[in-house]
Image (cartoon, grey):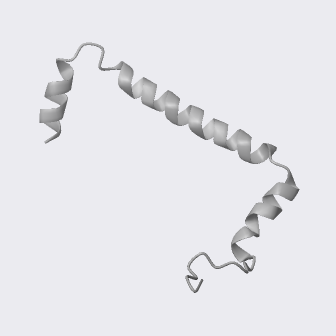
Amino acid sequence: MLKFVKGNLEIIDGVAIFPIISLLIFFTFFVGLFIYVFTRKKEYINEVSHLPLEEDDADPLDLKD
C-alpha cells in the first residue's frame, strides 16, 4: 500500500516541503506550550489544579426549579 502513496506523491511538485512545515508546526506548538506552562505562577497552577475537587453548590443538572 505504501508504494501507491509514494508513487502518487512523487509526481507532485514541491511535496517535500509538507513534512518540513508539519515538523515546524509541531515543534512550535510544543515549545510554546512548554514556555506557557513554565512561566505560569505557582499560585495559578495550584488554583487550577484544585478546581475539579471543589464542591459546587449549584448543580447544573438539577432541574427541580
Give the quadrant of the C terminus: bottom right
**Farthest residue, direction top:** 13
Give the quadrant of the N terminus: top left
**Farthest residue, direction bottom:** 64
Q: Nearer the viewer, residue 49 or 18?
A: 49
**Farthest residue, direction front:** 65
Total numbered labels = 0
Pinpoint residue 39: horizontal percent, then vertical percent.
Answer: 80, 43
Pinpoint residue 58: horizontal percent, then vertical percent.
Answer: 69, 78
Q: Within the image, what quadrant is residue 17 found in?
A: top left
Q: Within the image, what quadrant is residue 61 found in?
A: bottom right
Q: Nearer the viewer, residue 44 or 65?
A: 65
Left of 61 or right of it: where is 49? right
Pinpoint residue 55: horizontal percent, then vertical percent.
Answer: 74, 80
Please give the name of the residue rendered at 37% of the width and 24% of the height, measured from the top-left corner: 18
Please give the name of the residue rendered at 72% of the width and 78% of the height, measured from the top-left corner: 56
Q: Is residue 46 above or below residue 65?
A: above
Q: Is residue 27 above or below residue 53?
A: above
Pinpoint residue 28: horizontal percent, then vertical percent.
Answer: 58, 32
Q: Within the image, what quadrant is residue 22 found in?
A: top left
Please give the name of the residue rendered at 51% of the width and 31% of the height, measured from the top-left corner: 25
Please give the name of the residue rendered at 72% of the width and 42% of the height, measured from the top-left corner: 36
Q: Nearer the viewer, residue 28 or 60?
A: 60
Left of 16 or right of it: where is 35? right
